[in-house]
């Protein structure tokens, strides 16, 4: 059976939808996504983090901590060295930060709903083998991003802050961060390292579709590694090479793994 005939058999047998029906379906999908985000924002910003706090809201006043406050406290306790002080900065910084971080966390909570709605919208136009590939790509991208976030949170960021405060002590300055400076640095580190870890997924994707070849990637490996070390030097804020190496070495390992997998998915000439 020819590949073209096989693809025709795999194609979904639903009738082709008119253009305005596609627009109507897109509007419905977007409405579900917006509602899911709004519900997640309310959960993060308003709902107390524990049953005891919820009891306090109704019977003991408004002395409670919402979920976002618990998460912010955990970041501060996990990442900042002892003796560090966080200050508000400008008067609007705490309020702005509260809303920004709540939206980010809400987006993470609602991400399964968002992913499903996007997939449900584009799936009717895909062949069966394309659906399988899309699922694998989404899974691989999500897994590598989460792996990068975990690696950044437990390895890179704690060491980065320790090194920064060593230099703070050397110059005789106080260990003081503004809350915006601290949390912006934390979220920038988490997101950038998470995305950095997804690069091998796109490398394998490019190899599979013939955009790149394993031979070319292997021959330019030295230059790629030099570029990676330069990029990680920019991404990591501490002036020592420790954080840079903590970020570069995993990428080198993942790059070699990408070449290994790429040779098995690379299309034959």
Image (tube, helix red, strand yellow):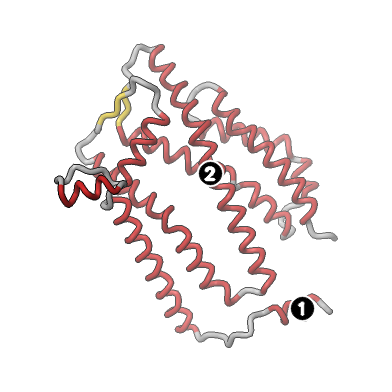
Residue indicated by mark 2: 194
Residue indicated by mark 1: 6
Q: Give left or right: position of 142 versus 51.
A: right
- Residue 178 percent coordinates (x, y): 30, 31
Q: Give left or right: position of 197 versus 236.
A: right
- Residue 254 percent coordinates (x, y): 67, 41
Residue sitting at x 42%, y 58%: 110
- Residue 153 percent coordinates (x, y): 48, 36
Q: Nearer the viewer, residue 29 or 16?
A: 29
Earlier along the polypeptide chain: callout 2 or callout 1? Answer: 1
Residue sitting at x 39%, y 35%: 75
Inter-mark Cα distance, 2 to 1: 38 Å
Q: Above or below — where is 194 with respect to 164? A: below
- Label 1: which secondary element: helix
- Label 2: which secondary element: helix
Where does the C terminus fall, quadrant-wise? bottom right
Q: In which image quadrant can residue 106 be found?
A: bottom left
Q: Above or below — where is 192 with respect to 32? A: above
Where does the N terminus fall, quadrant-wise? bottom right
Q: Above or below — where is 268 with respect to 160? A: below
């Amino acid at each position: 059976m020819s590949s073209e005939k096989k693809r025709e058999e795999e194609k979904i047998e639903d009738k082709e939808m008119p253009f305005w029906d596609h627009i109507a379906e897109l509007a419905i999908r977007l409405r579900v996504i917006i509602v899911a985000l709004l519900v997640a924002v309310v959960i993060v910003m308003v709902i107390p983090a524990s049953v005891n706090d919820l009891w306090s809201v109704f019977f003991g006043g408004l002395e409670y901590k919402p979920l976002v406050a618990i998460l912010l406290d955990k970041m501060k306790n996990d990442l900042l060295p002892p003796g560090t002080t966080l200050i508000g900065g400008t008067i609007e910084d705490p309020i702005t930060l509260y809303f920004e971080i709540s939206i980010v966390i809400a987006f993470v909570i609602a991400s399964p709903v968002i992913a499903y709605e996007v997939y449900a919208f584009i799936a009717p136009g895909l062949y069966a083998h394309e659906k399988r590939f899309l699922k694998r790509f989404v899974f691989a991208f999500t897994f590598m991003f989460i792996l990068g976030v975990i690696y950044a949170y437990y390895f890179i960021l704690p060491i980065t802050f320790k090194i920064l405060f060593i230099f703070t002590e050397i110059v005789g300055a106080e260990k003081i961060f503004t809350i915006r400076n601290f949390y912006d640095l934390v979220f920038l580190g988490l997101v950038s390292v998470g995305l950095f870890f997804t690069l091998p997924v796109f490398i394998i994707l490019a190899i599979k579709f013939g955009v790149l070849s394993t031979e070319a990637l292997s021959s330019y490996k030295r230059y790629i590694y030099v570029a990676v070390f330069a990029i990680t030097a920019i991404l990591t804020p501490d002036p020592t090479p420790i954080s840079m190496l903590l970020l570069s070495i995993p990428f080198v390992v993942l790059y070699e793994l990408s070449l290994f997998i790429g040779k098995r998915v690379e299309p034959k000439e």
